[in-house]
Amino acid sequence: MAEITAALVKDLREKSGAGMMDCKKALQENNGDMEAAADWLRTKGLSKAAKKSDRAAAEGLVAGKLAADGKTGVLIELNAETDFVSKNDKFQTAAREIANVALSEEGVDAISAAKTSSGETVSDMVTNLIATIGENMRLRRSARLSVDQGAVALYLHNVQGEGVGRMGVLVAMEGAGDAAKLQDVGRKIAMHVAATAPLSLSPADLDPAVVEKEREIQTQTAMESGKPREIAEKMVEGRIRKWQEEVVLLKQPFVMNPDQTIEQLVAETAKELGSPVAVKAFVRFALGEGVEKTQGPDFAAEVASMTGQA
């Protein structure tokens, strides 16, 4: 029986992406043969993949991609259980592959059923990753923006590798002017969106329920100040307008020039290009937002226990 050292286990983990204990077991079952152990992991992993589907997956990556003509952009969020997996080359490659598919397919179901460049479906690719790496994974969501004239800009924040990060923003700039200029301004606005997380593009796009909730809060605050009702109502309207300036993209002060709003930046761009320009839409994906997170595996403890240092 070959000696299964921590270094050997670490080597298999780096090559396969599987968990440390799974790698140790694979090497034990295959007398330390690295290639046989890797095959064993894949065979055993596929049968376990379905059992992992109910485990929380709030880590992972956001991947973004622009079409060759710059007029379409996509974002996808591929989740896993731990932050460690986001640094795995196979996981990053899968996220980029899914973003490529998303350029021609819209919606999670359609993307999952579509084939990758290697000929397997996205769904099968993710299942195989679960089998190999040993964590639950899922394609959580996707978004696509397109313009007939203009450009779609992409910004990835906290980049983990080519085309992948922990946050992604798309901004669709509509206009007949210089596409390169629109792309540049759009990317600056995308960086602004990443920093400020606006709720909507314009006041008209705000969710009525969100507006009503804010109005209730401001009304209660004004009434508690002891002001007469008519004065309190005027106070509320003023506060709602100020709140909109904080949460509506076009009304927000531009983070790169707080003396200018995004709306004014767009108007300035239109003047420079000599033709109308408009922000058609934006999308912001922050990794794991809205997903309940759980404590993942303690890899340091696993290493310590294997090397007798626990």
Image (spheres, rainbow, N blue to C red):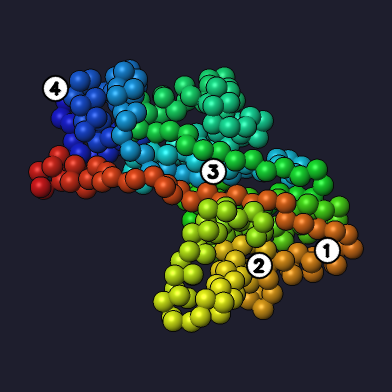
Secondary structure category for the residue under label 4: loop
Instruction: Confirm whether residue 255 shows in the render.
Output: no
Q: Position of residue 136 (x, y in %)?
A: 35, 32
CA gap, disc 4 and disc 2: 70 Å
**Furthest-right residue in view?**
274
Q: Amino acid at mark 1?
A: Ala
Q: Look at the numbered discs 3 and 4 and tell me whether their residues touch, using CB distance below 8 Å.
A: no
Q: Which residue is disc 2 drawn over?
A: 251
Q: Which residue is disc 3 drawn over?
A: 63
Q: Which residue is disc 1 drawn over?
A: 270
CA gap, disc 4 and disc 1: 73 Å
* Closest to the observer, 230 or 280: 230
Q: Which tag, 4 or 1, sits closer to the chain's start?
A: 4
Residue drawn at x 58%, y 26% as measured from the top left:
110
Q: Nearer the viewer, mark 3 or mark 4?
A: 3
Q: Which tag, 4 or 2, sits closer to the chain's start?
A: 4
Q: Nearer the viewer, mark 4 or mark 1?
A: 1
Where residue 64 sits, quadrant-wise, is top right
Q: Amino acid at mark 4?
A: Met
